[in-house]
Amino acid sequence: MRIINITLPALFLLFTSLTAIAAEAPDSCRNDLEAASVEALTADEADAMAEAAAPDTVVINADDELPMCCFAVGPSYYRKYRGPDFHFFKNTTNYSIKPYTFIQDQTWVGIPVFIAGWIAKSEKKAFQQNYKNSNTRIRLIKYNFHSEVDNYTQFSGIALTAGLKMAGVEGRSSWPRLIASSLASYGVMAAFVNGIKYSAKEMRPDESTKNSWPSGHTATAFVGATILHKEYGLTRSPWYSIAGYTVATATGVMRVLNNRHWISDVLSGAGIGILSTELAYGICDLLFKDRGLLMNDLNIHPDLSKNPSFFAISMGLGFGNKHLVLPDFDFEGYGVEHDDKPMSLEFGNATAVGVEAAYFFNRYIGVGARLRVKATPIKKWSAFATDEEIIMKEKFEATELWDGVQYLRLKVQSDHITEFAADAGIYFNLPLSSRFALGTKVLAGRSVMDDVDVDGILKGFKMKRVNGRFVPTDYYIDTKWDYINLSATNSFKFGSGLSLTYAHKNSFSWRVFLDYDYASKTYTASYSPLKVIEEFAPQILEQFEGYNWNPAMTFKSSIHKHLHQWVAGGALCVSF
């Protein structure tokens, strides 16, 4: 990632130079103003000038002290620049703007988002789709998803900010202040990300390198999105913020789909990106003070009684159905002793991560959608696999097939049932005040569940019948098969929920929620303990020709369940 590779000394040098430019600008401006013989305006003349001024003209009263730095049409008023703006070192200042303060710039929302990623590290593998699972029938994304788009979308926020600025769309800061704030943001982010990456040494999901947590791409994307949010989302329209954070979120999602990051990496990266930008802007507020400011925020605190629309990133804890007991497998004619007890599964509490957005037509009703990934752990699944491995080895050791085995074991590929859900519907809002609101919704959508696998792995030499006895050949095999697989049908789902939203500041809001979902699914367990014989010793199956079963068969057990599930959690919202 190019931004992160920029050395901190170089960033500091450039940042210091830009700050010096901003500090020196007032003296040159003062000299220009002193050289011009400016006469104080009378009150009537000032009023006449105000009436003649364009709508975007700021009038300075005759009694006011002349600004230290003012690139203006006349010595007594400031006119916004019109047309493309390529004056990168022109520190224009609008002195009708109230200076920002360090505390005003800090929302601290990045800290809980980072902590959410830290907490999710314990469940990171639960959210990884197993693309190599041949039993999975339907996926949300194409097989072996791969895209390079995230390498470019990470820079979309800063690119859009620079593009708007060059096009002459005035935002929060002048060019020198914007450049200094941006460089400081990326510098602070780079220090945080690299410092954590190479201390934590988290292995990536594709097992390429040990620098997974946190995600640098996501942090870069959220730095750009937060710069766009501060420069244009807060001063002109919250739609700039929505656009920036939507693309930044998509960048993080693509990092997961590309198998380059865990969801925990993306959450923590997003938190670092937001926090780094707020800290950098706060530092620049201390250094620049009122120099280089062009616009103030439209409204520091979002008003939920007027603007309840939102875009949210959420995390929660799921609970509901705790047990699943499947009927006996049909082992009739199997010919091998086996524990015929029903397959009983016990589930733990799920971890849920999602994004949600709604647009309100008025203060009470709107439409929206939600995407959520929920991973539910199966308790004692690893212990179950260990017991099955002992049984499988005993079967082989009792026969002459053991002579060809060099390595035989079971591997748990997934010990979580992962649900991918997409919903849409009607949202309701009940304002309690400008800063508090109750909400509810009625949703319908689609639920897709990934499978749970235990794979068998066998390495050795293929067996061949010689004189009525099986002996190893010179043909080496290294094979893997689905020893046991648990799947669930994809189905429609219905949901609702309650929420309480608190308007924080700078268009950010916090939300606590309790969601309910209902779905009807059929669970199927597929059991293939000796399927490897088809490749390892295929001649064994010849004696079973004409029968309706053989040792390599797959046995199934199914049950239909009505699922009632709850998710309680919190969300960070961008209100608009």
Image (cartoon, rainbow, N blue to C red):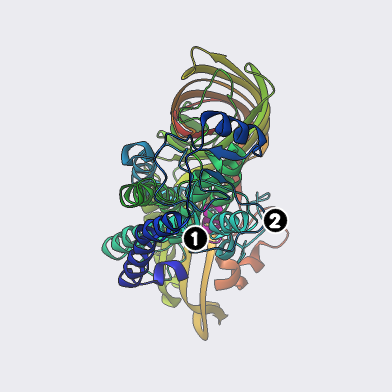
Classified by dominant secondary structure, the portion drawn in magenta counts as: helix
Query: Is residue 426 a member of the stretch shown in magenta?
Result: no
Q: Which residues are magenta?
A: 252-260
Q: Of callouts 1 and 2, which one flags the residue occurring earlier in the amino acid sequence?
A: 1
Measured as percent of width and height from the top left, residue 155 is found at 54, 60
In the drawing, does residue 411 fall left or right of residue 327?
A: left
In the drawing, does residue 552 fall left or right of residue 345?
A: right
Measured as percent of width and height from the top left, residue 236 is found at 59, 39
Instruction: Determine the residue positioned at 52% across, 24% down.
Output: 515
Q: Nearer the viewer, residue 275 or 136?
A: 275
Work out whether residue 383 can be spotted. Answer: no
Residue 547 is labelled as 2
Q: Nearer the viewer, residue 348 or 51?
A: 51
Please tell me whether residue 231 is drawn above or below residue 159 in the rendered image: above
Instruction: Determine the residue positioned at 43% across, 55% down.
Output: 177
> Which quadrant of the figure has residue 569?
top left
Work out whether residue 25 can be spotted. Answer: yes
> Which quadrant of the figure has residue 510?
top left
> Crowdedness of circle 1 by 10 Å Cα count: few (<14), some, many (20+)?
some
